[in-house]
Image: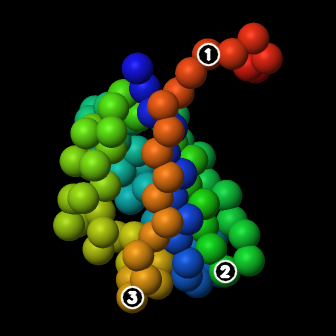
Amino acid sequence: MSVFVTIRITGDTALFRRSLTERKDDFAAIAQRARGKGGLHHRFGVGDGYVLVVDEWESVDAFQAFFGDPQLQTFIGSVGANTSMQPEITVAEAIDSPDAY
């Protein structure tokens, strides 16, 4: 069964937004790697001083192996994350329900 993963990362959201355009090829390459390692769905949201990542992964292990990559962590810092703070990560089993859409 797949898992949903949310990650709340504090940082410079203006830099993050610029990076989505200026470094779009880097983001696309990371997305390709994620899909190859078990990533099923991925979205970003931006709040007041934080970026929210909402993902679905084949398994917790697949997510942890991908997210723990030192190169990915360096990239995250380079696009505005405050690396002095740990991100807030929530993992939950994805389940079916009659009201899903």
> Which picture quadrant has residue 50?
bottom right
Q: Earlier in the sequence, mark 3 or mark 1?
A: 3
Q: Which residue lies at the image location 56% right of the left edge and 21% below the top edge?
A: 95
Residue 46: image x %, image y %?
A: 69, 65
Residue 49's mark? 2
Instruction: Kindly give the residue lying farthest to the right in the view shown.
Output: 99
Q: Which residue lies at the image location 50% right of the left edge and 39% below the top edge?
A: 92
Q: Amino acid at mark 1?
A: Asp
Q: Secondary structure at mark 2?
A: loop
- Asked whether the viewer can see residue 21, the reply is no
Residue with the mark numbered 3: 84
Which of the two residues, 49 or 88, is positioned nearer the viewer here?
A: 88
From mark 3 to mark 2, how far is it between C-alphas?
14 Å
Q: Amino acid at mark 2?
A: Gly
Other-residue count near label 2 (Cα within 10 Å), few / some / many at <14 / 14–19 / ≥20: few
Q: Secondary structure at mark 1?
A: loop
| Image side of residue 8 versus residue 35, left or right | right
Residue with the mark numbered 1: 96
From mark 3 to mark 1, how far is it between C-alphas?
37 Å
Which of the two residues, 56 or 88, is positioned nearer the viewer here?
A: 88
Q: Amino acid at mark 3?
A: Ser
From mark 1 to mark 2, how far is it between C-alphas?
33 Å
* Marks 1 and 2 close (CB-CB < 8 Å): no
Q: Which residue lies at the image location 47% right of the left edge and 78% below the top edge?
A: 81
